[in-house]
Amino acid sequence: MGKIRPMHPRLLVSCVIAADTHIDVRHPEPRLPMIRLEKVLRDAASARPVPDAFIVAGDVTSRGSAANWEKTRAVFASSPRPAREIVLMPGNHDTWSYGGYDPAFEEYRRASSDITGKEPVAPYSAATFGGFRFLFLGSTGDGGDYPILGEEQLSWLEREIRKEKETGLPVFVFNHESLNGRHGFPETGTAHPYPGMDPADSGVGAESARLEEILREAPRVFYFSGHSHMGISGEASARQKGYASIEEDGTLTVINLPSVGCGNHSGEYNHKNCCLVLEIYEERVVMRFRNAKERRWVGLPLRDGKSFWETPLL
Ligand SMILES: [Fe+2]
């Protein structure tokens, strides 16, 4: 038990990152995902210093309906503010509705505006925390399980990444879906893998290669996704099965988050109620998974026998 405190002195930026909270009035027990989101919010709110951002990396709701967003508003309204800024990203479930993408995005736009105090004008956006650039991607249409990023967004991302190249600073990119084939996907993207799965499953799909090409232009990128509901997997999984929740590949570090609200699978630690705490220091980045219900760090070894992931920033 304990509150979120930085690992090292001279913290520059900290963020609490959650995914797949899946608020759902059609859940057999609609209160359960609401309680899980509330626990993550309360845990984040107890952090000192106050986190720069609380981010939900998509699938805030199970369907982008007015009723689901109303419940989401209620949870945020009855919980302490978790951070200076709140970022709610639209996931594939948020952009699904009975009327198609446009009414779902409109519900998201209104709710996100009410909850965060900032009106999203597009499914993608950028923010700067402590001088570091954070880029949030989102689908511009209903592509089913896959996002439709589109050329306009990818060109915007390319311009943003090129600007950051001059600073030499790492860039933090968030997208609901992983790049294709990371974290053991497609087999680990479902509790019930089957032969002949589409290699793009649980990933971005057709635009993944182009997206990765753009990300590779930056000196350093940390790329965060959710979507799969894969449980937290550490270094034992990496060694024995060849995949993990955090994977490093040259200049690219990819991080996949478990679902806060739904059951997780394929991991070493499949609990709900978990989030990731990101800390940026001048010389390093530290990431730790956290069980917000138990208010403790997840003890699973991630790297070198340690339950945190630390990367020097050269
Ligand atoms: Fe999800």
Image (cartoon, rainbow, N blue to C red):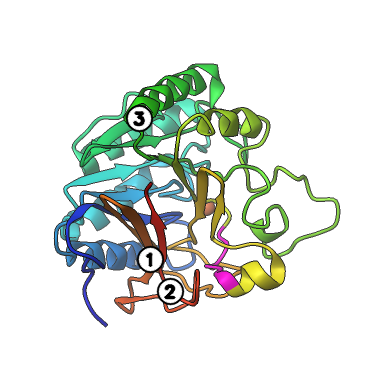
Above or below: residue 6 compared with residue 165: below
Give yes or no for contact between labels 1 and 2 (Cβ–Cβ under 8 Å). yes
Mark nearer the N terminus (1 vs 2)? 1
Where residue 63 sits: x, y (%)?
A: 48, 45
Mark nearer the N terminus (2 vs 3)? 3
For the N terminus, give its image quadrant: bottom left
Q: Is residue 99 visible?
A: no
In depth, the one of 215 and 139 nearer the eye is 215
Residue type indicated by callout 3:
Ser
Where residue 7 sits: x, y (%)?
A: 26, 68
- For numbered disc 2, what is the local secondary structure? loop
Give the extent of the magenta segment: 229-235
The residue singled out by tag 2 in the image is 307
Instruction: Estimate the spatial distance between the alpha carbons at disc 1 and disc 3, rounded to whole Å.
Output: 25 Å
Q: Main secondary structure of the magenta part?
A: loop
- For numbered disc 1, what is the local secondary structure? strand
Where residue 168 sits: x, y (%)?
A: 36, 33
Q: Is residue 298 left or right of residue 294?
A: right
Residue type indicated by callout 2:
Ser
The residue singled out by tag 3 in the image is 125
Above or below: residue 122 compared with residue 134: above
Residue type indicated by callout 1:
Arg
Quadrant housing residue 23 = bottom left
In depth, the one of 204 and 92 nearer the eye is 204
Residue at 30% of width from left, 29% of height from top? 120
Q: Is residue 282 left or right of residue 207?
A: left
Mark nearer the N terminus (1 vs 3)? 3
Instruction: Estimate the spatial distance between the alpha carbons at disc 1 and disc 2, rounded to whole Å.
Output: 7 Å
The residue singled out by tag 1 in the image is 288
